[in-house]
Image: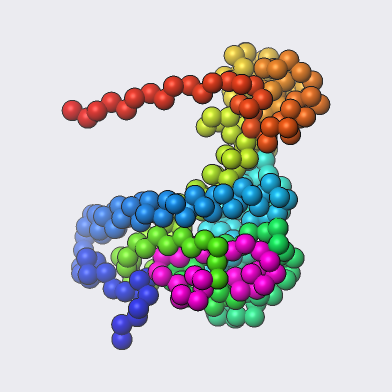
Amino acid sequence: MLDPRETERRNPRSASIDLASPLEIVDLINAEDTRVPIAVASQREVIARAVELAEQTFRGGGRLFYVGAGTSGRLGVLDASECPPTFGTDPEMVQGIIAGGLPALTRAQEGAEDVVENGARAMDEHGIGAKDFVIGIAASGTTPYVGAALVRARKLGARTGIVACSPPPPDLVSLVDVAILPIVGPEVVTGSTRMKAGTATKLVLNAITTGAMIRLGKTYGNLMVDLRATNNKLVDRSQRIVAEVCGVTREQATTLLERAGKSVKLAIVMHKRVVSREDAERLLAENGGVVRRVTGDEPPPVPAIPERS
């Protein structure tokens, strides 16, 4: 019987993949993967809207939650867990909720997505409220756990969104503030949404959190100035960023960072405005956390992309 969901359709281009050579398998998968960024690009306006909602949420003291099951849930947890080291955020600021809880991160809990009441219960357990933004992730668009979570989040006053790679039911779409639907088509292996659907979802989540963090002033240009230097690599990166932006030596950058409490952002403002740490904190607070608004630096010119011959 035919399933109406895009993610459950058979892909005619890979119908004979079981007889393919290793190189032919790789080429088939790669050819299908090239469709993913095109599908994501088709959702640029709604992704931008999600970035706006996330920024508003954070500036209002709210939290962003990703809710999903299986691969979708793991991708949400992954994106959330990368925000603190990359942008220096509190772990509470972006959170991932996966059906089946922590055990589902490393071992499939396939039945967890069908326990409807647990989706709603998760919203209550996390104290979802009017300040929060809840994004459901459901490759098929029909995951019961995710749908129930969104219904409950809406009742609790939160803003809501959904990321799906197959059109969700109309009643669910009408429930959310933003629906991001990168339709990537049937998978190379039918129903294996860890492939194209998973890749599309990863791209979308990357754009939402990265975009919102940039809007919050977590970068100076494309440099991550709110990172947490929790290992040697990040300590080195912090020193290199301060040295480059401030035009000082590595030793001077290290001293600046020590005075700034290891904050790259504060070190830059302290140096460029010749102010104390306390004054740098005040100036940043008055300018929405955006370093360039404090320093007045002009962005560098964008180099022209050479034409291909």
Asked if residue 159 is among those painted magenta in the image, a careful observer would answer yes
Query: Residue drawn 61% across and 47% down?
Result: 55
Residue 82 in sight here:
no
Q: Give the quarter of the figure containing the N terminus.
A: bottom left
Farthest residue in the bottom direction? 1
Q: Residue at x 48, y 21 (%)?
A: 300
The boundaries of the magenta stretch are 150-174
The residue shown at (35%, 80%) is 3
Image spot of residue 242 (x, y percent): 63, 22
Residue 146: % across, % down: 56, 72
174 or 189, which is in the foreground? 174
- Quarter of the rendering occupied by the C terminus: top left
Percent position of residue 54, x then y: 60, 51
What is the image's colouring? rainbow
Closer to the camera, 29 or 260? 260
Q: Residue at x 66, y 25 (%)?
A: 294
Residue 116 appears in view: yes
Residue at the outermost right position: 278
Residue 118 location, quadrant: bottom right
Percent x, y of residue 11 = 27, 69
* Location of residue 191 (image quadrant): bottom left
| Number of marks present in the image shown | 0
Q: Nearer the viewer, residue 121 or 290?
A: 290
Q: Is residue 181 left or right of residue 79?
A: left
Is residue 145 found inside the magenta-colored segment of the image?
no
Give the answer, above or below, for where 197 lies relative to 151.
Answer: above
